Amino acid sequence: MSALQLTSPLAAPVYIGLMSGTSLDGVDGALAAFPDDYGGGPVQTLASAYVPFPDELRAEMLALQTAGENEIHREALLANILAGYYGRCVAELLAQAGLTPQQVAAIGVHGQTIRHRPELGFTRQTNNPALLAELSGIDVVADFRSRDIAAGGQGAPLVPAFHQAVFSAPDTIRVVANIGGISNISVLPPRDERDGGTMKVSGFDTGPGNVLMDAWIGKHLGQAYDRNGDWAAGGTVLPALLEILRSESFFNLPPPKSTGRDLFHLDWLLDQLAKAAFKDTPAHARDVQTTLAAFTATTLADAIARYAPGAATVHVCGGGACNHHLMRQLQDALDRCQAGISVDTTAALGMPPNHVESLAFAWLAQRFCLRRAGNLPAVTGARGERILGALYPA
């Protein structure tokens, strides 16, 4: 049902989800309706919007990924600016759907991760949800990850619970791979086995998605990302470098596990290049990009082949779904694993790849409002199910 077909009152509560991820490119927003007793089925997406970040804002967010001078002050100012961009996205969603703030139950906003250290008991998403509530006139639910970490979990990934609700099928194992800055997978058992069967939903971060490729093309070509993977497609994989990249100890850790820019960043990559005695020349820079695409694809494929035996298809969402070269590399890597798994996007399941994460945080806001758990302990490692988020009333 389109927004133009909606009548008032709405058939189900309406929620907004806002996501700005590791790629630091902008805010993805979605406005959607879910049944109160949501347990699967189609999501009623009423509007979607994207608000890009300017280069100077992206640079400041990137700078705050590491310790620096006066960072508390800088982070507070950044949070205020981000709230303004979130507010713009909300206004665009409302305008598209023809709704007023009073018709929206809540906004679920992830915030911008600048630290993720679950092993030290904390995660930090820059955000000013109180200001967003003031700007939008809508209740805001934020800080979704901290409650899971307080219960001994990783606080990530959180999207497998949403994937389970909307993508699981009655007679097949499905794999959903989210390739954003970081890659993660959800392994969804057949729906009738989710509770009473032997299989449980599993999911974890598999390693870099686009984060290293974005950093490398930014360093050499001044571009924010490799459109369609065209630059990587023209190079050659460097086997010795790929082996060094894949030797990172993170890949040998068992799930539950999560990661981010705290580990995988440009300086980490430069250290690996030094180990490979790589000379950073224009002639070889493209080959590094090609190798980084292979790095993302092979680490994803390894995880899928190991933890999703019996799956027929992996459905990709996130920005990586638009990288045609990366999608081909993922299929090739799965073929080499003899996994017998084909690659598609979540569009084949009725949901555009760039809408999945924002819809997930709309869903998590709904879970909070209904006082229902939003985490999966088998995924995050938490001691049990927990209601995620904190409320900032309008």
Image (cartoon, helix red, strand yellow):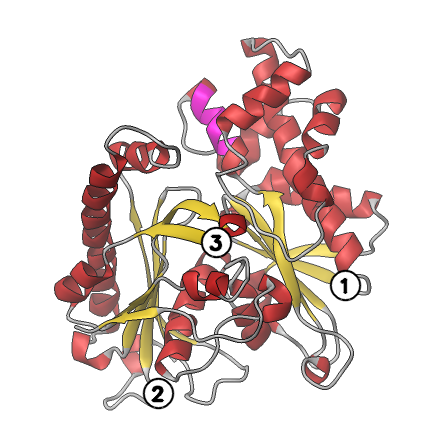
Q: Nearer the viewer, residue 159 or 247?
A: 247
Outermost right residue = 338
Q: Is residue 216 magenta?
A: yes
Q: What label does residue 312 carry, if any?
A: 1
Structural crowding at the residue carrying mark 3, measured as other residues with C-alpha within 10 Å and reported as few (<14), some (14–19) or many (≥20): some
The answer for how far apart the CA atoms under marks 2 and 1 are is: 34 Å
Structural crowding at the residue carrying mark 1, measured as other residues with C-alpha within 10 Å and reported as few (<14), some (14–19) or many (≥20): some
Q: Where does label 3 land, which residue?
A: 121
**Res. 332 image quadrant:** top right
Q: Where does label 2 land, which residue?
A: 12
Say whether residue 354 is left or right of residue 94: right
Considering only order in the chain, which callout, 2 or 3, is on the residue closer to the N terminus? 2
- Residue, x 50% and y 43% (percent of image)? 181
The answer for how far apart the CA atoms under marks 3 and 2 are is: 37 Å
Q: Quadrant of the N terminus?
A: bottom left
Look at the image and give the residue range highlighted in magenta. Answer: 213-219
Q: Are marks 1 and 3 in contact (CB under 8 Å)?
A: no
Considering only order in the chain, which callout, 1 or 2, is on the residue closer to the N terminus? 2
- Residue, x 62% and y 64% (percent of image)? 379
- Residue, x 20% and y 67% (percent of image)? 95
Q: Is residue 322 magenta?
A: no
